[in-house]
Each structure stands twice: as structure tokens, then as C-alpha cells.
Amino acid sequence: MDGNGRWAKAQGLSRSDGHAAGTRTARALVTSCRELGIEYVTLYTFSRENWARPKEEVSFLFDLLRRFLARELASLIRQDIRLNVLGELSELPLITRKVLQHTMKKTAGCKSMVLNLALNYSGRDEIVRAAQRMAQDGLAPAEMTEEALAARLYTAGQPDPDLVIRTSGELRISNYLLFQSAYSEFYFTDAYWPDFDEAALLKALDDYASRKRRFGKTGEQAGETS
């Protein structure tokens, strides 16, 4: 969800205003995905690298997240959306952690959609932690398979992402779901995140639907469906 700060600058607003606008976009897009029947949505909300931002901005982001979750809890339950976190919760501020845990507990029974928030997240760190867990679990080298590693990722039990969307003209994946996105389709757009509305989402989904997914196989082996 890139471009909040640049969007705000273009509007003559503060970075905080840009982040606030970004949360409104997130709310609208999650609702659109739920209405479209998309069962898993992951928002890259705060990376481990984001701790290097100014302390005031980091504090504002977590305060914004707490207020967002408190405000949206009833909506999540009404839409039957379960909240899940990808990342190390233990390293987040205590109040933020408690709000997240409360929201996850309250939505644990929701089944229509899973909303993953990647918080304090790093794809490389996730893989390292999963490898460490395999060693801690006493797996022999021959047992350290892709399936064994996948079962120890934050996304264990979830399908790999079909489509990864990145906004604001950035053409890289920035340490995001490195293992899981091996065969994902990627969609890059110049739109800043606050401007990425439902029409932009539908355009991305239409583009995705026009592609032929082969997963490393020939077109005939993959079925060549669109």
C-alpha cells in the first residue's frame, strides 16, 4: 500500500493526512473484496524496515491502526471477516498488541474472508524463523521439505497469493511474501494507494483474469484457462 506520503505532498497535506487517507482506502477495498467473494486479502501494513522511520510517524501509524481496528471491529464481524496478523506481534507496542489480539479473538469465528495484516513483517525473517522452527522441532535434513517449511510460516493453512498488487509506481516486492509469491501474478500501478479505488481494483482483477497461469509448466499442462 505505497504512496500515502507522496499523495499527501501532492495534495499539500501532511504525511499523517496521507496515512489516514490510506486507511479509508483499505476499508473500502476490503469491503469490495468481500463483496467480490475473495477469500483471502493481505495488506502489507508495516514492515520490519519501517521501524527506521521517524519515531513520531511510527507512533502515529500504530495509533491510527488502533483507532481503525476499534472503529471497524463491528464491521468485520458483520461482514464475517476474520483478522489475522503476519509478523512478530510480541515486538509491537503493548496497547497495539492488545487491540490486535482482542480483534483477532472477536473475529476468530468468522469464515467468509481472512484479512491478513502484515505487521512488523519481513519475508526473509519469516523464512529464517520457519527454518529455525524446523530445527527446533527436530526434523532431519530429509524432512525439511517445502511443505514442512510452509507449515511453519505465518500463512500456514492459507493458499499462496494469486495476485500481488503494488501501487505508486514501485517495481519491486520489498521483502513481501517471498516464499508464498513464487508463482503469484504481479500487478504494478502508478496510482498512489489513497487513489486506488474499486475501479482500480477491478482493472487489476481484469488484467489478472486475462493472464494464463502456467506455474512453470507448458500451456497444455497448465490447462491455459483465463
Image (cartoon, rainbow, N blue to C red):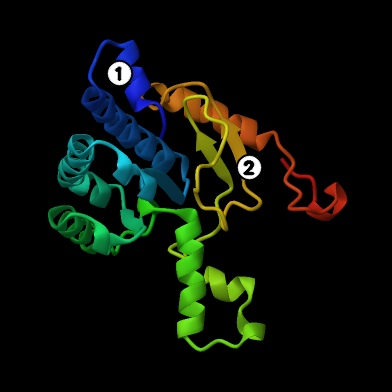
Crowd class of label 1 (few under 14; some 14 to 19; many from 20; radius 10 Å): many
Q: Earlier in the sequence, mark 2 or mark 1?
A: 1
> What's the residue at 42%, 23% (across, down)?
192
Q: Nearer the viewer, residue 14 or 31?
A: 14
- Residue 8: give its label: 1
**Is residue 157 something one can see in this rendering?**
no
Type of amino acid under label 2 = Glu
Mark nearest the camera among 2 and 1 is 1
All told, the count of numbered labels is 2
Q: What distance separates the C-alpha of mark 2 from that of mark 1?
A: 29 Å
Crowd class of label 2 (few under 14; some 14 to 19; many from 20; radius 10 Å): some
Tell me residue 28's x, y (percent): 33, 32
Q: Nearer the viewer, residue 58 or 86?
A: 58
Tell me residue 51's x, y (percent): 30, 45
**Is residue 9 something one can see in this rendering?**
yes
Type of amino acid under label 1 = Ala
> What's the residue at 60%, 88% (across, down)?
140
- Residue 155: give its label: none
Q: Nearer the viewer, residue 141 or 201?
A: 141
Q: Nearer the viewer, residue 158 or 150?
A: 150
Secondary element at tag 1: helix
Relative to 209, 130 lies left or right: left
Secondary element at tag 2: strand
The C terminus: image quadrant: top right
Relative to 14, 208 lies left or right: right
Tell me residue 221's x, y (percent): 84, 55
CB-based contact (under 8 Å), mark 2 and mark 1: no
The N terminus: image quadrant: top left
For this orientation, the residue located farthest to the left is: 95
> What's the residue at 28%, 33% (across, down)?
23
Relative to 225, 59 lies left or right: left
**Residue picked out by circle 2:** 185
